[in-house]
Structures are given as C-alpha cells and as structure tokens.
Image: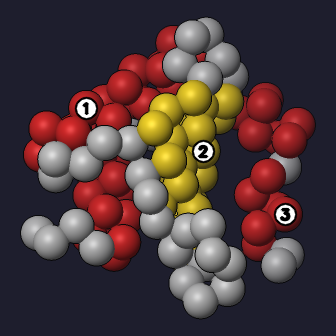
Amino acid sequence: MNNNSEDIKDFILKCLEEKKAENVTCISLKGEVPIADYMIFASGRSVKNIRAIGEHVALELKHVLKWNASVEGLAGSDWILLDAGDVIVHLFHPEARDKFKIEELWEKR
C-alpha cells in the first residue's frame, strides 16, 4: 500500500467496519477543496464507544500504515475529529451528529 488518499480512505473504512461504527458515510472532496480528498462520518453507540473507535483507527493507521493521524476530542467528547491528511474522519455520538449537521454542510457544497 502506498498510502495515497484512496488507500487511506479504504483502510479507515475497513477499521470503522471492524469496530462496528454505525451510519458510515464517505464524501469525496477531490478537486473541490484544498483541505482533504475525503470526509468520512460515522456514529458510535456512546461516548465511550466513539473513543474506542477513534483510538482504534489512529493506532491502526500508525502501526499498519506508519501514518500518524492527529486526533481531537478523545477525552470524553461526543465528537471526535481524526485528521489523516487527505482523509478527515468525524466520529459522533448520534445526538451530536443530529445537532451539528456537519455532514449536511459538506453534502450541500
């Protein structure tokens, strides 16, 4: 794997599936915005669950792909942001996902 944005996106989606993340959506931003090629949204069942998912994805990226991702919100938040370069992941508690509607903003671009 050469760690291009497509490979990283596919790897993250596989990690989310392994940890049973719910309501996973991936939006392609290629050529539209300079910040990322993909934006992934997923939900967990609880704050503890989204933390476990976020930690799993970050550790798998580091150990398997040798890719360091920046993670914000692991300390008991209902929204975790994982920045893996050209792939940005938002992990939400379902109520926070409904409240902030970040996904809808990106879908309307």
Q: Say if residue 69 shows up in the picture.
A: yes
Q: Which residue is mark 3?
A: 105
Q: Quadrant of the C terminus?
A: bottom right
Q: What colour-coding does the image apply?
A: secondary structure
Classed neighbour count for the residue bearing mark 2: other residues with Cα under 10 Å, few (<14), some (14–19), many (≥20):
many
Q: Residue 22: horizontal and vertical position, in percent?
A: 52, 42
The amino acid type of the residue labelled 3 equals Leu
- Residue at (82%, 62%) from the top-left corner? 104
Q: Which mark is residue 43?
A: none
Mark 2 → mark 3, Cα distance in angstroms:
13 Å
Q: Which residue is mark 2?
A: 90
Furthest residue to the bottom?
A: 31
Classed neighbour count for the residue bearing mark 1: other residues with Cα under 10 Å, few (<14), some (14–19), many (≥20):
some
Classed neighbour count for the residue bearing mark 3: other residues with Cα under 10 Å, few (<14), some (14–19), many (≥20):
few
Q: Quadrant of residue 2?
A: bottom left
- Residue 59's place in the image compared with 9, above or below, is above
The amino acid type of the residue labelled 1 equals Leu
Q: Quadrant of residue 4?
A: bottom left
- Look at the numbered disc 3 and give the secondary structure of its residue: helix
Q: Earlier in the sequence, mark 2 or mark 3?
A: 2
Q: Residue 61: horizontal and vertical position, in percent?
A: 25, 44
State how many labels appear. 3
The amino acid type of the residue labelled 2 equals His
Mark 1 → mark 3, Cα distance in angstroms:
29 Å
Q: Say if residue 19 shows up in the picture.
A: no
- Residue at (76%, 67%) from the top-left corner? 106
- Nearest to the eye among marks 1 and 3: give it: 1
- Residue at (50%, 47%) from the top-left corner? 83
Q: Earlier in the sequence, mark 2 or mark 1?
A: 1
Q: Which residue is mark 1?
A: 59
Mark 2 → mark 1, Cα distance in angstroms:
16 Å
- Look at the numbered disc 1 and give the secondary structure of its residue: helix
